[in-house]
Amino acid sequence: MIAFDNVAYSYGGGELLSEVSLRLTPGSFHFLTGPSGSGKSTFLKLCYGELLPTVGTVTIFDREVHSLDRDEVARMRRRIGVVHQDCRFLDHLPLATNVTLPLTVTGRESNMQDLSDLMAWVGLSQLADALPPSLSGGERQRAAVARAIITSPDLLLADEPTGNLDWEMSLRLLKLLVELNRMGTTILVATHDLNLIRSAKQQVAARVLRISHRRIQLAGADL
Amino acid sequence: MTLRELLSEIATPDRQADRVVPPSGHTAWLTGFTAGTMAFLAVFALALSLAAGRLADRWGEALERTATIRISAPEEQMELQTQAVLDLLAATPGVASARALTDAEEHALLEPWFGSDLPLDTLPIPRLIELQEEGQGYDAQGLRQRLAAEAPGAILDDHLRWRQPLATAASRLRLLGTVSILLILASTAAMITLAANASLAANAQVIGVLRLVGARDIYIARAFVRRFTLRALAGAAAGTAAGLVAVMLLPSADAAGGVLTGLGFQGAGWLLPFLLPPVAAVTAFLATRAAAFRKLKELT
């Protein structure tokens, strides 16, 4: 699914990630943890081609990202759902339109029943016509999750998806991620919420990657 | 890109794609205003170019097939030399007709310069003979030699020295009009490119989101390109209409007015300004498309 071979990423003269070599196999469930500023978001951006490695190679869906042209990057991203920390919506469009955006840009019609079910599941049925700036942080995060999974992606990347959610909603989201994973979606969640990770490990064979000193290691079972 | 694809890209509305780009106030106004102003100016440049062309043709036709023989001789020899020249011309191949201008005609020619009370009888006015060419025309050099022999006071003026600078001036005017139209189109493209760049930069966040969810550059570009093309088309149509009204309000052509009152459209020429809006739209389409793809690479 995704392979990092001796990858390093530098920005502004400083190296943010070094000697990263790992593989995310199809159907796997990974958490990525580490202190703030350790490079979790950078790693996720390398996973969907928003950033390119300065050293080494990143291979996504068997294609080396450096070799992809812009159209190929776009097609690759259609197979990946991304939940950003800052959510990133089109603020002039209603929430439902934002959620269906991954379908819209590929010319696909959204099934109204599926959309309605999805909006209900993330608890946003009443806010389908609301504009994103009027939503709370938690509501935006749930909408971002809905947008990321509406296309049933092969890979789901989530950057602190529960950062603004209460514990109950976090568990609900986790349950959704576990269900998606059971249906075959590869999941990678960057989080510093150790309780969420412990809860997940009770439900699924999740592995934990930890970023420390610019390197990524497989964490022990003591989390 | 074929013409059909181009037209399809402009004419086929993709409401979803159009909606993903938020309405942009000042760039919309700027694009429409620029296209309108440039089309207004282009109407005048076109009118100038066409008028210069007509003028060149008119001067050319009026002077090209005629010549004048001026006879300056003592009064007692004037009639003799005039008749000798007319006889000579009658036998010259390439001359269709020749006739001596009457006193009244010569008086009319001089009247604008000396007034109507000119006492022609008291002045040594040369006799003028007007000749019309036919076929391949006459041999000017041979005619001059024969005139020198038959009528020493006769001088052939084949209008070449008048025709050449007039034709040159008219063709330069026509070129000036064409260059003006090209410059106007280039300026339109430059202004629309700037407006498109500003709009794309202002929507960097929108573009980032669209790329994130898998939108191809062509999808994002199309929303901008279509919007700018339609604005340019509407602005240019308004500018062209205003330009045509302004040209219609110009004084009509008359002989006394010369070049200035001849500035306008005639016959099928009135149809040419209607090409300006589509040309402006195509210019906007190409300019915005190039700007969009360039900017998209910069932004994401």
Image (spheres, coloured by chain):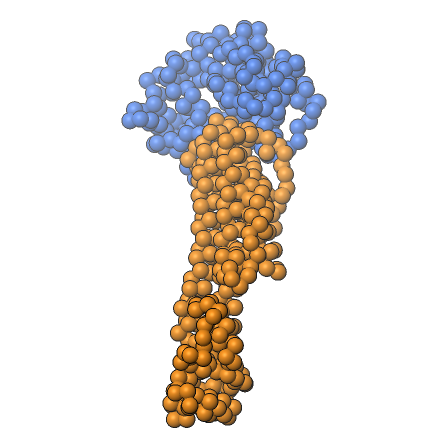
Chain colours: A blue, B orange
- Relative vertical location of residue B10 with respect to residue B70 in this rendering, above or below: above
Q: Residue at x 42, y 79 (%)?
A: B122
Which quadrant would residue B242 be assigned to in this image? top right
B208 or B185: which is nearer to us?
B185
- Relative vertical location of residue B241 with respect to residue A161 in this rendering, above or below: below
Image label count = 0
Q: In the rendering, at what x and y percent does residue B239 appear?
A: 55, 44
Horizontal relation, residue B183 to residue B19: left or right: left
Which quadrant would residue A174 be assigned to in this image? top right
Q: Residue at x 69, y 27 (%)?
A: A111
Say whether residue B254 is visible: yes
- Relative vertical location of residue B265 with respect to residue B75 in this rendering, above or below: above
Q: In the rendering, at what x and y percent does residue A95 appear?
A: 60, 20
Say whether residue B217 is visible: no
Q: Residue at x 59, y 34 (%)?
A: B17
Q: Quadrant of the C terminus of chain A?
A: top left
Horizontal relation, residue B11 to residue B65: left or right: right
Q: Residue at x 41, y 87 (%)?
A: B75
B285 or B233: which is nearer to us?
B233
Q: In the rendering, at what x and y percent does residue B102 appear?
A: 52, 80
Horizontal relation, residue A46 to residue B90: left or right: left
A46 or B178: which is nearer to us?
B178
